Amino acid sequence: MSSAGLRLVAVDGPAAAGKGTLARRLAAALNLPYLDTGLLYRATGRRVLDAGGEPADPDTAVAAARALLPADLDRPDLRGPDADRAASAVAAIPAVRAALLDWQRDFGRRHGAVMDGRDIGTVIFPDAPAKLFVTASPEARARRRWAELAARGVVRNLAEVQAEMAARDAQDASRSAAPMKPAGDAVLLDTTALDIEAAFATALAIVQARLGR
Ligand code: CDP
């Protein structure tokens, strides 16, 4: 089924590029529902870890993806190094992605949406009218993630945070199932030198132009 005509905004990009903050603000400004699709992979990985399983094992991970409940997305333990690694591991399994595909499409098709992730513009809604691929330098992204963690009381070594992020981005970009990459018609937005206000203003102008309003 085509999603042409729907107000769909795809916000893809690597870890800690600022996608979540931007996508949430775009959704509020455009009066659209917002979905953080990373939570689906994080919650799947967390279910596997809870059961003492191995996130890279396809059977275990697919069963966890199929068993997801809405409340799983509200769990407080979906962020941090273990959850990051488990999410990226389950996300590389094609059957896990397949199990989560219809739910994401149904979400977007109901009322339109702003969705952030890795494959929204390439796989979930390839005909979305507005697509952003948000990036920032590895150093800037690591500093942002480090600061986010610190604000939650989690004190980490900056170099370790950057190394973990680089490993996860490499895995996300090199997997064969829906690898992280910009869609051909995505607008690249590098937020390295932009604060949140400037990034938001730039993103909103791009999206409004694409949505035709
Ligand atoms: O917040 P951050 O950018 O660090 O990560 P996230 O967006 O919550 O995504 C966590 C992990 O889920 C990523 O490293 C990907 O492996 C996976 N993911 C994906 O494969 N496809 C998506 N649409 C969203 C996330």
Image (cartoon, grey):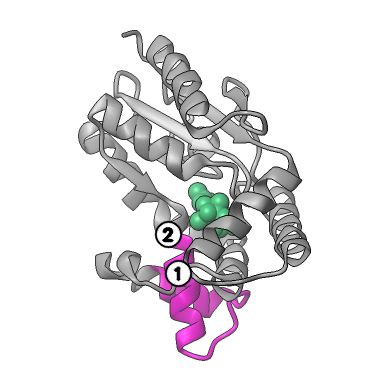
> What is the number of the mark on residue 133?
none
Quadrant in the rendering for residue 211 = top left
Give the number of marks: 2
* Residue 95 visible in the current orientation: no
Residue 28: % across, % down: 27, 33
**In this figure, which residue is indicated by the disc labeled 1?**
78
The image position of residue 43, as x and y in percent, is 42, 69
Q: In the rendered image of this protein, does residue 143 appear above or below residue 121?
A: below
Give the prevailing secondary structure in the magenta stretch: helix
- The mark that comes first in sequence, 1 or 2, is 2
In the rendered image, is residue 104 in sight? yes
Q: Is residue 64 magenta-colored?
A: yes
Residue type, mark 1 in image: Leu
Q: Quadrant of ligand 1?
A: bottom right
Q: Quadrant of residue 184?
A: top right
In depth, the one of 210 and 66 nearer the eye is 210
Q: How far across and how far down the image is residue 62, in percent?
A: 47, 71
CB of mark 2 near ligand 1 (< 8 Å): yes
Q: Where residue 79 sits in the image (x, y, percent)? A: 50, 67
Locate residue 112 relative to residue 86 in the image: left or right: left
Q: Is mark 1 within 8 Å of ligand 1?
A: yes
**Could you tell me which secondary element the residue under label 1 belongs to?**
loop
- Callout 2 environment at 10 Å: few (<14), some (14 to 19), or many (20+)? some
**Frontmost residue, 34 versus 92:** 34
Residue 167 relative to residue 208: left or right: right
Q: Nearer the viewer, mark 1 or mark 2?
A: 1
Question: Which residue is nearer to you in this view: 34 or 172?
Answer: 34
Q: Which residue corresponds to mark 2?
A: 39
In the image, what residue occupies the spot 61% across and 71% down? Answer: 155
Segment tinted magenta in the rendering: 40-65
Q: Residue furthest bottom?
A: 52
Q: Do labels 1 and 2 touch, CB within 8 Å?
A: yes
